[in-house]
Image (cartoon, rainbow, N blue to C red):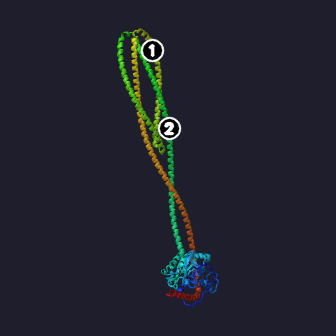
Amino acid sequence: MTSPAIVPTARTYPMPTPAPLATPLSASPHATLACLEMARQLAAPQAVIHIGAGQGHGVLHCWQRWPVAHARIIDADESRLQWLPAQPTGTAAPDWQALVAVVADRDGDVDFHPASNPAEDGLLPVSALLGLWPNLRALPHNTQPAQRLDTLLTRHPLPAPSADAATWLIIDCLPALRILHGATDTLNRVSVVCLRAVLDPARLADPHASLAAAADFLAGQGFRCVHVGETNHPAVAEALFLRDDKTALQAALDAQAKLATERAAQIDALTTAKAAADKLAADRAAQLDALTQAKATADQLAADRQTQIDALAQEKAALAQARDAQTKLATERTAQIDALTKAKAAADKLTADRAAQLDVLTQSKTTAEQLAAERQTQLDALAKEKAALAQARDAQTQLATERAAQIDDLTKAKAAADKLAADRTAQLDALTEAKATAEQLAAERQTQLDALAQEKAALAQARDAQAKLATERAAQIDDLTKAKAAADKLAADRTAQLDALAQSKATAEQLAAERQTQLDTLAQEKSALAQARDAQTKLATERAAQIDDLTKAKAAADKLAADRAAQVDALAQSKATAEQLAAERQTQLDALAQEKAALAQARDAQTKLATERAAQIDTLTKAKAAADKLAADRAAQIDALKQDNAALTTERDALKQTISEGQHRQQLLEEEMIKADAQLELIKDLLLREPGL
């Protein structure tokens, strides 16, 4: 059956006064009481918090006879707090409050276990207490709302302890540790802790009820155990703890000093690391600046080289245009020379013909008178000459045929050479374009600049040669023009001579009228044979000239093809070198870009690390300042406590001398009363431990 939830209530009672008892005291309660009196002298209680007050009897209730201004008397059973109004009235104590509540380590519902002995009701199940009291019986347990002591005192607060008064905490129930866990804030204002705990943990299954666990916890809160006294049960003890401010402050000071040392070491390490990081960042920044300057220099050099390449390309194009113009001019001059040469040859032929005619006519005029007698001889000579001319004609025809075949072969060879030259020219142009493309990719073009400079020199030399050739051709044209004029004049003179000789020939022809038919026939045959011979001779001469020209052209084409092939090989090799150089430069640029990116990333990381380290240093500096301030405050508190301790020692000595007699009489009365209570508890405990009852 679950009992209804119990709401804490507060009541105000008068301070009780001790009742006189005449029963002698046992040794153990006397020692505990003496220790409590000593603690009272050291830390007089201004306020008392008594948890598990019960019926108001026992050694731990001795504070009720002291002048305590404020008290919070707590128990889970309201009926067990009814003893407060029955106490004799005395000095008014308006701030004594009875609080009905279950105190635990957390806020919320907990299992509450009633027992056949109401003094052992609490958070521990009865089965866990059988190792101490075998005859203890369990009553139906229920669920009740529990509160932490800190929460309960928030609703029913106590005044802050003064310099000459303290707050006591008394835990008169099991398990004390669970209550202490819920009273961490309250312990900061408490100077004395009294509690009931189990000496032998083997007798109890719950470790929270052991004295060792409570002592360890309170040691962490700055309390020292100064007394452990047995109760009616040899396995249960009552312990007294006093706040050890000196030890706590010394430990705090040691911790602060250790922390300050560690923080100083950390600051030194961080300072060293920051200096190293700053130095590294400065070095990286210098390297980055150097790389930036080197990159700018390389970019400027590449731009200068590109400008030089563009200038050389323009100059090359201008030289090529000049070369083409010179070549075109040379071709035109060559055509003019060929035309003038042909005209001169025609004039020379005409002059030779006229000279031959003049010679013939002169001979005819000279031998006209002898023609009649010698015609028979002439006919024989003409017959022989006819045969010779026919033979010469056949030879000239065969020679012309052979020369025509040679001309065809040379024409084909020239065409092949021209085609090869055109192919090599196309390859040269393609490789020149590839070379220009490779030149744009390279960062340093010194080798190509030298090649272009050489090509420029060659083109300039070719241009000078073309200019010189054009000048020579112009001089040849002038000379041929003059020779043509002279030949024209000579032809005119010879024409006049021919006219005169024609008149003489007409006279001579009238003298040889009878032989005219034979002479005309022979002259016609001779003229035809001579014309055929001259034609064959002219054709052979022309074919020979053509053969010489074609041979020279073929040799020039072969030489040009060889030169173009050498240029093609040189340009191919230059292109390969330029491509390799461009690849190497590109690899270097990629490596520099990667190194630059890595340096930028490392610089950013170092900057971020330096910022974080600076923030950590600021934080540590503030923490060190706070620690130094706290250490100074704690040192001041230690000095004040030392002074207070000295003053309290002096006051204690004076009080000992003043109250020694009255204290002795009061102790006798209290011991008698405690002994009576102890005898009652012993009888009750013996009855509970006796089997069969």
Few, some or many C-alpha atoms within 10 Å of disc 2 (few <14, some 14-19, many ≥20)?
A: some
Q: Are circles 1 and 2 on residues that touch, CB within 8 Å?
A: no
Residue 602 falls left or right of residue 655: left
- Residue 381 position in % (x across, y down): 35, 14
Frontmost residue, 667 versus 130: 130
Q: Which mark is residue 202?
A: none
Give the answer, above or below, for where 604 lies relative to 644.
Answer: above
> Does the rendering let one see residue 673?
yes
In the image, farthest residue toward the front: 1
Residue 577 falls left or right of residue 219: left
Q: What residue is disc 2 on?
A: 315
- Residue 652 position in % (x across, y down): 58, 82
> Does the rendering let one see residue 228?
no
Give the amino acid type for the residue marked by disc 2 in the picture: Glu
Few, some or many C-alpha atoms within 10 Å of disc 1 (few <14, some 14-19, many ≥20)?
A: many
Frontmost residue, 270 versus 379: 379
Give the amino acid type for the residue marked by disc 1 in the picture: Leu
User: What number of labels is visible?
Assistant: 2
Q: What residue is disc 1 on?
A: 498
Residue 179's quadrant in the figure? bottom right
**Residue at coordinates 42% horizontally, 19% vertically from top-left?**
352
Q: Secondary structure at mark 1?
A: helix
Alpha carbon distance from label 1 to label 2: 61 Å
Frontmost residue, 463 versus 122: 122
- Residue 280 position in % (x across, y down): 50, 57
Q: Earlier in the sequence, mark 1 or mark 2?
A: 2
Placement of the N terminus among the 4 image quadrants: bottom right
**Residue at coordinates 59% horizontally, 89% vertically from top-left?**
20
- Residue 682 position in % (x across, y down): 53, 87
Q: Secondary structure at mark 2?
A: helix
**Residue at coordinates 41% horizontally, 26% vertically from top-left?**
545
In the image, farthest residue toward the bottom: 22
